[in-house]
Image (cartoon, rainbow, N blue to C red):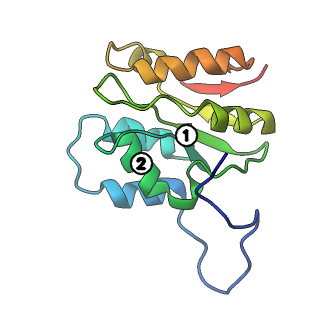
Amino acid sequence: MQHSHQSSLFEPDTGSPPSLSLFERMSKALQGSTHLYVQKDLSKARGATKFIGRGSSVSSTNRYRQAAGDLANCGRYLPGDVVFVSAEGARRQRLAIDRDELALAARAGVTFVTDPPAERNRPYNVGEREVEAFLEGLGYRDDGQGNWKRP
């Protein structure tokens, strides 16, 4: 499995300000966007420490992955991580969810943040439903708000 992140678990203290949070990175990348679901997705990023998602070049998921930088699909997860998951919807040439990366994060015991059921069950959101089925298969349960933990 190849990951987009090569640095160690801990960044060295260089005296410079800490790197931007996932929410700050996404907010900056999405500034000025008028896309209908930007605020919903930014709310999923608030408090998240990592991002898992892959999407075709025209997808929001791909845009979020690019904004997340080294916090996206990083291959390293800790039990305290909160992982924002984005999955591509029903479109031509959509990319399937990254089951390997999700399983890796699940083995660490992270909390996942996805769309809540009302959003997940919109006809377009086939990827979100794939994530739901996969996380349920790993023993995770949704609190009804899109926050997934193991009981």
Q: In this orientation, which residue lies closer to the viewer: 23 or 61?
A: 61
Q: In this orientation, which residue lies closer to the viewer: 56 or 110?
A: 56
Q: Which of marks 1 and 2 precedes in the sequence? A: 2
> What amino acid is labelled 2 in the image?
Tyr
Name the residue that disc number 2 marks.
Answer: 64
Quarter containing the C terminus: top right
The reply to whether discs 2 and 1 touch (Cβ–Cβ < 8 Å) is: yes
Q: Estimate how packed mark 2 is, as few (under 14), some (14 to 19) or many (20 or more) residues with alpha carbons within 10 Å.
A: many
Is 120 rendered above or below residue 58? above
Is 130 rendered above or below residue 30? above
- Which of label 2 and label 1 is nearer to you? 2
Is residue 142 shown to the viewer in this render?
no
> What amino acid is labelled 1 in the image?
Phe
Is residue 84 shown to the viewer in this render?
yes
Residue drawn where x is 47% and y is 26% of the image: 115
Residue drawn where x is 63% and y is 50% of the image: 2
x, y percent for residue 94: 36, 30
Name the residue that disc number 1 marks.
Answer: 84
x, y percent for residue 124: 32, 19
Residue that lies at the very extreme toward the bottom in this rendered image: 15
